[in-house]
Image: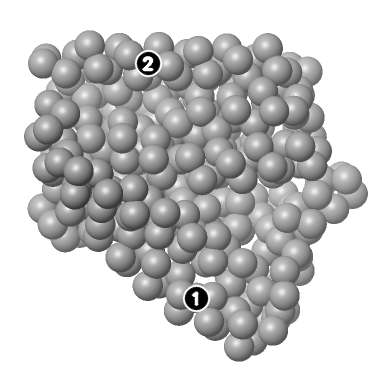
Amino acid sequence: MFEAIGLFLLGLVLLALGGDSVVKGASGLAQRAGLSPFTTGLLLVAFATSLPELAVNLHAVASGQQSLALGNAVGSNIANVGLTLGLAALAAPLVVEWRALNPLWLVLVVATVVLAVLGLDGGISRIEGLGLVVAFVAVVAFAMRRAGEESPEVRAEIEDYARTSQELGQNLLRFVAAAALLYFGSRFVVRSAQPLGEALGLTPLLMGLLPVAIGTALPEAAAAIAAARRGQGDVVAGHVIGSSLFNVLVVVGVVAMINPLPMPGSFVRLELPAALAFALMLYPVLRGDLRVSRREGAVLLVAFAAWVVYELLLINR
């Protein structure tokens, strides 16, 4: 038991370090290749911060633990809104002016509903998985096309997020280090998940939904708190929505493309509606006063804690 806990925690640390390294390396190489800091920042917000989750889920699929991958993908979305955004807003009120986030939020809501509909027959097929990935490519293309409409303040904020060294050797080293850290981190997390789950009475699905999803979200929450204190509300909100879209469309899509992904009926009835409910909680922010106050952050955290308790009460279902 203690060995599994140690391995799990070590894996989470390696994933956090690998995620930070790949973001910096990708930013430096992209700008060296000619992409503007603004475009680079958009791409990083859209998917780079979710690469640790993708690494864990690919390792889970390779180990025959698809339920762990499914739980992690959806649990990460709930943690993105309830935990990451909640903690960031509690640290400092967020101001969100990024215009493209409004339609992207709508895509997230629709994608979550579509995922639930696709799962009504008991799983996601390879063709359906491919469709999800293609949809993500279209979403990124849309975001790039809308980029020119953003205000100078939003552009400056995202450019600042992407700013890093463009030295070739340093960034190649960052990528090599990130690949090793993500590989071993995901391997340790997946290897320890089964014995930990058995000791805690959690199925692989709930192990991915709760400990793994929350564990991989903590470094992102720490980064979001730091960004909130710097006044980068757009970066925080963009990460929450972009990362959630990546999880629903790319992570679930790629896992299903590798091997058809079973989806239990209880998951479609309980966990996916919960993910949808948390996504809908973003509506007042993106359609209202464009602010996330400390009080709203506290509400998100309370809702997240209530969801965790609810899931734990249903362990024996």
Q: Is residue 3 left or right of residue 251?
A: left
Q: Secondary structure at mark 2?
A: helix
* Residue 96 location (% of width, % of height): 75, 32
Q: Is residue 146 left or right of residue 112?
A: right
Compare residues 180 and 34 and report the one nearer the observer: 180
What residue is disc 1 on?
A: 175
Query: Residue at 60% across / 58% down in the picture?
Result: 44
The CA span between labels 1 and 2 is: 36 Å
* Residue 269 location (% of width, % of height): 24, 17
The answer to whether any part of residue 287 appears in the image is no
- Name the amino acid, label 2: Trp
What residue is disc 2 on?
A: 307
Q: Quadrant of residue 31?
A: bottom right
Of the numbered discs 1 and 2, the one sitting upstream in the chain is: 1
Query: Residue at 42% across / 22% down in the picture?
Result: 276
The answer to whether any part of residue 160 appears in the image is yes
Which quadrant: the N terminus? top left
* Residue 26 location (% of width, % of height): 58, 70
Q: Residues within 10 Å of mark 1 (few under 14, many from 20)?
A: many
Q: Return the residue found at the far front.
A: 2
